[in-house]
Amino acid sequence: MTPYANPQAGRGQPPPSPWRIIAAGRGENPPPEQLSAGLFGGDLIVFRGVDAVQTLLSRARTIVEAIFESANPCLAEGRLPAAAFQDRVRQARRRVQHDAAIEDAWQQILATLGFPPAEMQRDRLRLRVVPSRAGMRSRTSRPLAPHRDSWGSGIMAQINWWLPLYPLAPTRTMLIWPGRFEQSVDNTSAEWDYETLMQQRGGDYPLLPVARAAPPEPGEPVLIEPGELLAFSAAHLHAGLADGSGLTRLSLDTRTVWRRDVDENRGAANVDGAPRRPHWEMFTRHQEAP
């Protein structure tokens, strides 16, 4: 059975789960065009067994653990003052963003999955740090409210990538509402402006457009293991979740757009977004080293 087969299709059964597990390290990943089509149809794809993901995970952990001076930086919010904690968060983010080994590993991941790095529009790879306790959070280190990334970027061919650095818990992870993928959600995208955000860096302008209210049904917690990589359409409604446990959540995330998806009109449906224009300036095209 292929990763996309649905043995219950047409038999009056409930719709299949959007979760797909692909052992890409064994060469089981479908062609990238098929991956894109599945993602833009709502699939939530977890890639397992990719050597370059393990390399990325190991390098990111090495950086974070060195900066927080701990083999378990998830506990750092309990032993550092808030200002010192946030200073180390900023240091770790900068190191991750500019680390050559991390960049090399990410390019290898894309190539392993069949996406030519030279054809990708890419956002930077971000270290996401979400303290469990409100007193340790900042404007950029906090759980994000329910949102679709496509509300901000205006690009329906955008794919999101997410990798936890340490084990997750149902109350300390990311939530996704798969049932809202094709359902309209009232949101602030019509009034949010990317240019204003860029002009007011460090101010209190919203970082992104969000849902005006969370859906009444609970979101599904993402409970993948460190070393597993989640890919999902930017049109999925998702949010951050923290639990007051004293354990910080640390993860890596980024966004890509494959130019071939744009050229061949592949992308998710825009069911409720009202961005003013596509914000291609959020992305940079990969340049091959000379």
Image (tube, helix red, strand yellow):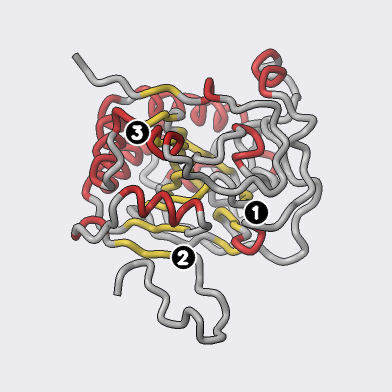
Q: Horizontal placement of 235 versus 139: left or right?
A: left
Q: Residue at x 62, y 53 (%)?
A: 241
| Disc 1 residue crowd, few under 14, some 14–19, many 20+, Cα 10 Å | few
The residue that mark 3 highlights is: 63
Q: Horizontal placement of 253 versus 236: left or right?
A: left
| Disc 2 residue crowd, few under 14, some 14–19, many 20+, Cα 10 Å | some
The image's mark for residue 19 is 2
- Give the Cα distance between marks 2 and 3: 31 Å
As helix, strand or loop, the secondary structure at mark 1 comes to: loop
As helix, strand or loop, the secondary structure at mark 2 comes to: strand
Looking at the rendered structure, the kind of residue marked 2 is: Trp
Q: Residue at x 42, y 75 (%)?
A: 6
As helix, strand or loop, the secondary structure at mark 3 comes to: helix
- Where's residue 174, x and y in %? 56, 53
- Give the Cα distance between marks 1 and 3: 25 Å
Q: Residue at x 79, y 48 (%)?
A: 186
Q: Horizontal placement of 288 versus 73: left or right?
A: left
The image's mark for residue 244 is 1
Question: Which numbered disc, 1 or 3, marks the residue that appears first in the sequence?
Answer: 3
Above-or-below relation of 11 to 167: below
Looking at the rendered structure, the kind of residue marked 1 is: Gly
Q: Quadrant of the N terminus?
A: bottom left
Foreground mark, 1 or 2, reads 2
Q: Horizontal placement of 78 versus 137: left or right?
A: left
| Disc 3 residue crowd, few under 14, some 14–19, many 20+, Cα 10 Å | some
Looking at the rendered structure, the kind of residue marked 3 is: Ile
| Quadrant hosting residue 259 | top left
Above-or-below relation of 208 to 279: below
- Give the Cα distance between marks 1 and 2: 28 Å
- Where's residue 166, x and y in %? 41, 52
- Where's residue 132, x and y in %? 61, 49
The image's mark for residue 1 is none
